[in-house]
Image (cartoon, grey):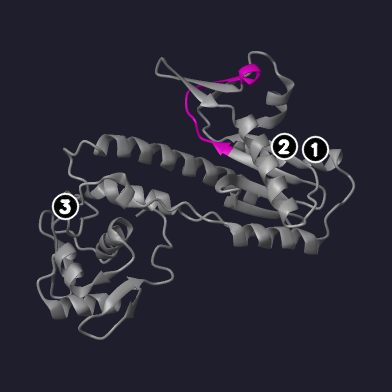
Amino acid sequence: MIGKTRAYPKELMILEAIVRRLPPNDLKKADLEKKLYRKRAGYKGEKTLDYFLAQMDHSEMVILHDLRIPLNGTHFQIDTLIISPYFLLIIDSKNYAGTLIFLPEFNQLIRIQNNIEEVFSDPILQTKIQGSQLRLFLEKHHITPPPIENLVAISNTQAIIKNPANDQEVSYRVFRSANVSFKIPPFYKKYTQPLLSKNEMKKISRYLIKAHEPLVPDPKSMNLPFNKMIPGVQCPVCETFGMDYHQGKWTCTSCGHKSAQAPIQALRDYFLIYGPSITSKQFRAFMKVRSSSTAKRLLATMDLSSLGTTKGRTYFPGKGFFDYEAL
């Protein structure tokens, strides 16, 4: 069973909103765009692994996606954790392009792309560390875990994987995501004694889900030019910030496209960049709505909760307001 699905990361939402609203000539924009590109690629790789895992028979296991667990004043993160009666399995997903050269002697992964050589931390070592951290977390909660195994999935189908030292552990641990259904069964042959009951598996799952703390970066700590952020509703077709609300419809003043979703995305941007609440006055200024009565009517139609009287009412995102993939 899937005990925890992989939600679209709040970190990605925040980066998307910031990049969307930063002026083209802002000095920070290029670096943030590169970071956003890397984060999107990583998420895409994780979703690729999820797709192939979902095709397996997972009735005898619990699968937890995207865990970030506090431990000793910091956090450790696990892309995918499989809980079985016999073992726990950590799978880390990498979506690197180019030629990937594993050098376990030095705990390095070399990536060569466009004749540029880059050094990355050894993902096999990363999963081993995650396993040690997971064991410590469970033992602190008086749970004796079964053996903890680890794998590294390469999700980019165009990546070239090299193991120049013919290291057995690299060959054993590293695989392409599409091959996951063939990488897991050998662990059942290696560990034949069940150590966890179904209730114990569920208990571990509950502890980890309850402890999970998603990464939510604070835009206020990024030294952003908030006074230069572009307001308004962005057209999803021509990407101009110039949609106007008139006679019950949002229409782009540049290309004429009409959209019911664009103002929702704009309001998401506001919450992601400026904070968890908005007033009618702030809504009018950011969305460029002229009438206060129109602003209140629009706010009432969106998935929002509110506090306060009619005059001083403050609006907050509803429970499912951010439940979306990138628009």
Residue 39: x and y in percent read: 43, 41
Q: Mark 3 or mark 1: which comes first in sequence?
A: 1
- For label 3, the residue is 227
Q: Name above or below for residue 313 compared with residue 244.
A: below
Was residue 265 drawn as part of the magenta stretch in this picture? no
* Rendered position, 105 above or below 283: above
Classify mark 2: residues with Cα within 10 Å, few (<14), some (14-19) or many (20+): some
Residue at the spot 11% in from the left edge and 76% down from the top edge: 291
> What range is drawn magenta here?
93-106
- Cα gap from disc 3 to disc 1, whole angstroms: 57 Å
Looking at the image, the residue that sits furthest to the bottom is 309
Residue 96 within the magenta-colored segment of the rendering: yes
Q: Residues within 10 Å of mark 3 (few under 14, many from 20)?
A: few
Secondary element at tag 2: helix
Asked if labels 2 and 1 touch by Cβ distance under 8 angstroms, the answer is yes
Q: Residue at x 38, y 67 (%)?
A: 321
User: For the N terminus, which image quadrant?
Assistant: bottom right
Q: Which residue is mark 2?
A: 183
Which residue is farthest front? 73
How far apart, in angstroms, are the residues tagged by discs 3 and 2? 52 Å
Image quarter of the C terminus: bottom left
In this rendering, position of residue 251 left or right of residue 29: left
Three-letter amino acid code at the position of disc 3: Asn
Q: Which residue is mark 1?
A: 186
The answer for how far apart the CA atoms under marks 1 and 2 are is 6 Å
Closer to viewer: mark 3 or mark 2 = 3
User: Is residue 265 shown to the viewer in this render?
Assistant: no
Q: Nearer the viewer, residue 4 or 274?
A: 274
Q: How many marks?
A: 3
Q: Secondary structure at mark 1?
A: helix
Front residue of 213 and 24: 213
Q: Which percent across, then down, holds residue 113?
A: 43, 20
